[in-house]
Each structure stands twice: as C-alpha cells, then as structure tokens.
Amino acid sequence: MKLLITGGAGFMGSNFIKHIFKNHPNWQVVNLDKLTYAGNLDNLKEVGDSPNYFFVRGDIANKEDVKAAIGQGVDKIINFAAETHVDRSILEPDAFIKTDIFGTYTLLEAARENNVAQYIQISTDEVFGSIKNGSFSESSPFAPNSPYSASKAGADHLCRAYFKTYNLPVIVTHSCNFYGPSQYPEKLIPLFITNLLENKKVPVYGEGNQMREWIFTEDYCRAIDLIIERGQVGEIYNIGTGYEKQNIEITKFILAELGFDESMIEYVKDRPAHDFRYSINCEKLRGLGWKSEIPWDEGLRRTIKWYQENEWWWKKLKSGEYLDYYKKQYQSR
Ligand code: NAD
Ligand code: TYD
C-alpha cells in the first residue's frame, strides 16, 4: 500500500506517519507538505531515512506539486494539509481559503485523474458550529462561524460533491480537538504548557467557560488507520471521545501539574464569534470497532511531560514570526 499523506510535517500528520511506520512497516508513504510555519521536519526525524518514506515539498493548491507527489503511484490519499488555527483565520483568512478550499479541490481533481482507491478528508467538528446540549451526528447541518471552519466546511462539501457527481471514493471525517506531543504552541494546550514552562501567564479568552471535546494523538491515529481499512466510501465518520472539558478546567489542571496557582491566569478579551461548545456523537465509528483508549488526564500528563522534556523542539518556534503574530492578535482585539 502506498499512501499520499498531505500536511505530514504538521502536528497530527507527523504523528500519523509515525503510527503507520510502527504498525504497517511495509506500507509506503509520500508526504506532500508546503512547510508553512506549522510544518516542521523535526517531527519526522525518526522516519526520514526509511526507504519507504518519500518527501515532496509542495503546495496542495498547486497542480504541478500535486502531480509530482501523486505521480509516484499512490493508492490512497489522506488530506491532513490545512491552515488550522482559528485565531489566525480571523486575522488573515486568505491562506485558509487558498489551502483548505482550493487545495482540497486540487487534490480531488488529481485523485479523479489518477483513479485513486480512496480519498480521506481530515476535517473537524467545527464545521457544525456550536451546540448547547446534546451532540452533532454525521448528518447534522453545517453552520461554521470562523473563516477556518467555513473553509473546512467548503472543502467537505466539495468532497461530498465529488463522490455524488464523479463517484470518487471519498470518506469525510469530523474530529473533535486534538492534543498530544508536538502540537504547535499556538493552540490552547501547548501554548499554556510552554508559557508556564517559561514562567509566563496564560491568556484565557473571556471567562474560560467554553467547552471542547478532546482526543489524544494515539487514539486519533488508530481511528484513521481503521477508516483506511474498514471505512465505506461516500460515508462520513465523526471521531470523538466524550472527554468534554471547559477551558478553565484544562487551565487549572495544567497550572496544578506544573506547580502554579491561579495568579498565572490572565483573562483576556474574548475571541470574536467564539463557539461555546463542540460535541459529536461517534457511535458510527465505534460500530467499526474503535474506542478511545487513552484517558483524558493520562493524555494530558503525557503531553505536559513531552513539552518538559523537549524544550529544544518548542523554544525555537516561539520567536520571530510567532511573536509578530501574537502582537497582531492582541492589537486587533
Ligand atoms: P498543523 O497546523 O499542525 O499542520 C498543518 C500542516 O499542513 C503543516 O505541516 C503545513 O506545513 C501543511 N500545509 C499547510 N498548508 C499547506 C499547503 N497549501 N500545501 C501543503 N501543505 C500545507 O495541523 P493539525 O493541527 O495537525 O491538523 C491537521 C488536520 O486536522 C487539518 O486538516 C485540520 O483542519 C484537522 N483537524 C485539526 C484539529 C485540531 O484540533 N488541531 C481537530 C480536527 C481536525
Ligand atoms: P484552540 O486550541 O485554538 O482550538 P479551537 O479554537 O480550534 O477549538 O482553542 C481551544 C479553546 O481555548 C477555545 O475555546 C479558545 C480557547 N483559547 C484560550 O482561551 N486562550 C488561548 O490563548 C487559545 C489559543 C485558545
């Protein structure tokens, strides 16, 4: 089996490539990645020399780059590549439209031309918008509220249309929030851990009572692996765990684990159009034989430990362009 994994130098893409080499040593992986600020080849040091690994630096929205990657004769495509951070999408939506929508379109066209056996779209529960009570199912209507979620929703609609119109073997997956080792330190959990490791305060938006459902890297990788093997084309799968946490609860857990008190919290202006709660029903995925195996606090302790032990990985990321972004973000609110 030869997989084309896009965005494989990012957080979950790189964890997934490592999962593949551990669990399917005979599979081959082509990684097509543009290496944006979020792409990091340090994430792939341990697989870089494998004869079954091929790296193509390129843009999923560029036909020629996609051709160079797919031309290596791939069986299946898993599209992890995206612009992924909601706050950045509020500041500068442009790259989100280009990569998340036009990039997906470019890949779908290439999948069609090359008769790939399966195309899996990595998407998010954020396309459904916010839900006060209960959980979204695979057939809930889309109601995205940020340029990020709107771009992902646009891409998911294209996937559906390519299945319906051209019979392309597409599967769409909507996952809850990821956490685990090597997540870029702009997202809530790695930002708060690394700020505290630098003795800096943590910026909680609003009152911190918003809720997210969380999945640890290893559980997520097993879910996608199962969908590659047993997912039905034309279907949609939600990937969730039921681990629902308020932001403030997560903040207090990290503070306590690192030996700080609540004076390290800085309550800052809320994010515009901040979704209050995400929750998804993932009975359909459980029906394929998957269940979450990593308890929430074990995953969070393992994540904290990883950042403690891998300062070299994140320290160099928190400078330059990163600091410009933060300045811009707080000025704009
Ligand atoms: P990330 O931001 O850590 O990495 C994104 C990767 O995509 C980087 O390696 C980057 O270089 C690459 N990339 C960006 N634009 C590209 C382009 N035009 N062409 C080629 N490569 C490009 O991402 P992540 O948080 O690991 O998320 C991976 C996927 O999972 C995304 O599709 C995201 O929407 C989805 N998702 C994320 C979460 C989450 O909590 N982070 C939850 C659900 C779904
Ligand atoms: P984030 O990790 O950006 O993921 P998403 O917005 O895609 O769910 O944010 C998770 C939650 O944490 C969200 O409710 C916003 C909040 N948040 C903060 O309170 N402070 C921060 O500095 C960040 C980045 C997020």
Image: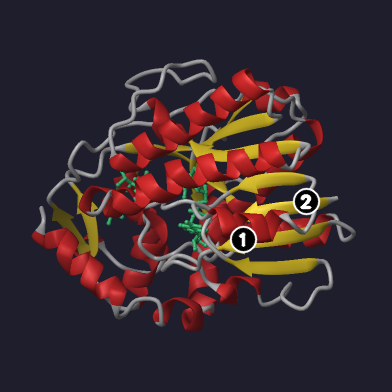
Q: Residue 208 carries which label?
A: none
For image coordinates 66% across by 54% down, the residue present is 5
Q: Residue 32 carries which label?
A: 1
Q: Residue type at mark 2: give it.
A: Val
Q: Judge from the rendering whether residue 219 lies leftward or rightward of residue 161; answer left or right.
A: right
Give percent across and percent down for residue 183: 48, 62
- On whether ligand 1 comes within 8 Å of the CB at mark 1, the answer is yes
Which is nearer the eye, 115 or 250? 115
Q: Residues within 10 Å of mark 2 (few under 14, many from 20)?
A: many
Task: Give residue 258's position: percent from left, percent from top.
Answer: 40, 68
Which residue is labeled 2 in the image?
74
**Does the rendering let one see residue 92?**
yes
Q: In this view, does 106 lie above or below 287?
A: below
> Left or right: where does residue 146 sit relative to residue 103?
left
Q: What residue type is labelled 1?
A: Leu
Residue 231: percent from left, percent from top:
74, 29
Q: SS of the residue at dot 1?
A: strand
Residue for point 29% across, 74% down = 321
Mark 2 residue element:
loop
User: Label 1 vs label 2: CA separation?
Assistant: 12 Å
Q: Where is residue 291 in the image (x, y as percent from the top left)?
A: 69, 34
